[in-house]
Image (spheres, rainbow, N blue to C red):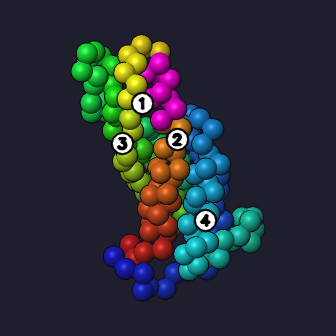
Amino acid sequence: MGTGSERPYDSIFIQAVETQGVIPQSAAIFTTQLRDTFIKDARLRVVNTPQEADAILSVKLGSLRRERLTSLPNDTGLTRKFGLQLNASCTLIQAKDGKAYFTDRPLIVERQIFSESGTGLTAATIVSTQQVQAEYQIVPQLATPLAEQARSAVLDTW
């Protein structure tokens, strides 16, 4: 892999990320991080409309897999630590005729969250609420590597 080859596009339009309900209300965070990643890279000009672009990037979140890593010592049914795996895909098409440069290229991001604050509370509803809160708090940490993988798919030699 490298970045030394010539690309047939100089500008890119980044569509809003399709979350498909995987992480509700997270589309703006993922889309903003994608745009910021490409803007900071500066190898392509990020434009505001598909009509201005040479290429159009779309990203779809596919699934969020949770794996139980650590349970509470006094109740193994209540999980303290989860491993999260976010599966997504990206597609890059020509803006003029819709011809694909690539379609459904997989993107996978893994992170860990803690669902228990260390207070010793073991009620299932409290831990469940903490898990939801922890998942929302980690969205920016999922968005950054996802955006970096999408940038690599678009800009690096395939």
Q: Amino acid at mark 1?
A: Ser
Q: Amino acid at mark 3?
A: Gln
Q: Earlier in the sequence, mark 4 or mark 2?
A: 4
Query: What segment carries the magenta color?
Result: 126-134
The secondary structure type at the circle numbered 1 is loop
Q: Position of residue 114 (x, y in %)?
A: 38, 35
- The label nearer to you, 3 versus 1, is 1
Q: Position of residue 91 (x, y in %)?
A: 52, 58
Q: Nearer the viewer, residue 78 or 36?
A: 78
Q: Quadrant of residue 43?
A: bottom right
Q: Position of residue 142 (x, y in %)?
A: 47, 49
The secondary structure type at the circle numbered 2 is helix
> Which disc number belongs to residue 117?
1
Residue 122 on the magenta span: no
> Which disc number belongs to residue 137?
2
> Which disc number belongs to residue 112?
3
Residue 16 located left or right of residue 138:
right
Q: Nearer the viewer, residue 25 or 124?
A: 124
Q: Nearer the viewer, residue 11 or 25?
A: 25
- The label nearer to you, 1 versus 2, is 1
